[in-house]
Image (spheres, rainbow, N blue to C red):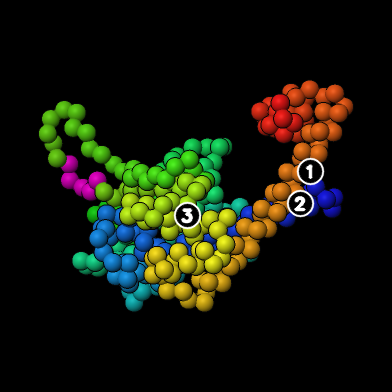
């Protein structure tokens, strides 16, 4: 394998491992509890410890398919011989080609036995090939439609559970949080239609490149920013988690933080190596009297990026 291709493969592999580690860290109940307190109305004002106790243990990380027809599976038969439908999980080693929920789980409500279905997605940056909100709409729609025969049967639509799809997008220009949900605009008359307008919820959380200040309104952003940072050292991350947020430092979470920091170092070093190699190619073509436009086209860069490299 030539060096250039090998570097690309290694960089991709490191990023894939980093993304998997980020999902695992976000999937800890102590972290999920704090996300729920800020993003889900039902849990605002409740202590992290109490919210943590309401999160069910069956947290699926990168295993449940989003695709229609694949989210549910038969998990057993009840005493009446009726099929029991549950979340379908796929083997991590053979899940190529599937679109998977990053994290999906149930959380009970404080006042009773009702539950909410929560999906959490992590994005290292805002995608450019599609609009991220469109993808979020698809995911939250699947959370609703996949409940058929699992949470409700036949026409028992009143049994549909409320759902949230929470998107955490890193490397944004500023901290942000948006709640996108159904609204009821009365255009003609004052008819009140029966049913719940709160079933479908999307929460978009943008994390600035720099870690948020230590302020109450930035509390969740600071936590997530520190946890997912590619620049903070292991000791700094653990200090913020332990001393600012009082998250119990179990051995498992400490080890996962260490792994993430090591992967970040690997990605940074690989990026530096690729950047040096790319600059070498730009200057070589420049010495051969290639124009900025020709260099950009050949190396699949923008004219602005080429000009920045050669200092024009």
Report the Cα–Cα distance between label 1 and label 3.
30 Å
The residue wearing badge 2 is 7
Assign a secondary structure to mark 1: helix
Which mark, by number, is residue 277? 1
Q: Is residue 19 visible?
A: no
Report the Cα–Cα distance between label 1 and label 2.
11 Å
Assign a secondary structure to mark 3: helix
Choose top left, top right, bottom left or bottom right for residue 151: bottom left
- Residue 178 location in percent, x, y? 36, 44
Q: Is residue 76 left or right of residue 53?
A: right
Which secondary structure type mostly characterizes the magenta part of the structure? loop
Report the Cα–Cα distance between label 3 and label 2.
28 Å
The quarter in which the C terminus is drawn is top right
Q: Earlier in the sequence, mark 1 or mark 3?
A: 3
Assign a secondary structure to mark 2: helix
Residue lying farthest left? 190
* Residue at image point 17% right, 41% down: 193
- Residue 153 location in percent, x, y? 32, 58
- Residue 266 location in percent, x, y? 68, 58
Mark 1 vs mark 2, foreground winner is 1
Tell me the magenta residue range: 193-197
Q: Is residue 195 magenta?
A: yes
Which residue is at the front of the view, 305 or 59? 305
* Residue at image point 85% right, 33% down: 284
Residue lying farthest right? 288
Looking at the rendered structure, the number of numbered marks drawn on it comes to 3
Q: Is residue 50 visible?
A: yes
Which residue is at the front of the view, 175 or 98? 175
Does the residue at mark 1 contact the one at mark 2 (Cβ under 8 Å)? Answer: yes
């Amino acid at each position: 394998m030539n060096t250039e291709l090998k570097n690309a493969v290694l960089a991709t592999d490191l990023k894939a491992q980093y993304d998997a580690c980020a999902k695992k860290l976000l999937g800890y109940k102590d972290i999920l509890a704090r996300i729920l307190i800020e993003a889900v109305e039902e849990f605002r004002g409740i202590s992290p410890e109490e919210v943590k106790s309401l999160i069910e243990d069956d947290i699926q990380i990168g295993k449940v398919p989003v695709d229609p027809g694949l989210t549910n599976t038969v998990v057993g038969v009840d005493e009446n011989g009726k099929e029991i439908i549950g979340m379908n999980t796929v083997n991590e080693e053979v899940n190529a080609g599937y679109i998977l929920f990053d994290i999906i789980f149930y959380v009970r409500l404080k006042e009773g036995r009702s539950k909410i279905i929560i999906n959490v997605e992590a994005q290292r940056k805002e995608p450019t090939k599609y609009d991220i909100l469109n993808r979020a709409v698809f995911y939250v729609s699947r959370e609703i439609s996949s409940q058929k025969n699992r949470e409700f049967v036949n026409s028992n639509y009143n049994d549909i559970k409320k759902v949230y799809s929470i998107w955490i997008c890193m490397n944004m220009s500023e901290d942000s949080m948006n709640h996108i949900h159904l609204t009821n605009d009365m255009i003609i008359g004052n008819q009140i239609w029966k049913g719940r307008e709160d079933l479908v919820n999307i929460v978009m959380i943008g994390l600035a490149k720099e870690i948020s200040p230590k302020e109450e309104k930035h509390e969740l952003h600071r936590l997530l920013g520190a946890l997912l940072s590619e620049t903070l050292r292991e000791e700094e991350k653990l200090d913020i988690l332990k001393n600012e947020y009082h998250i119990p430092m179990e051995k498992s979470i400490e080890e996962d933080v260490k792994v993430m920091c090591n992967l970040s170092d690997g990605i940074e070093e690989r990026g530096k190596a690729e950047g040096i190699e790319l600059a070498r190619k730009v200057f070589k073509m420049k010495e051969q009297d290639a124009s900025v436009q020709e260099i950009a086209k050949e190396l699949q860069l923008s004219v602005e990026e080429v000009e920045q490299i050669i200092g024009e």
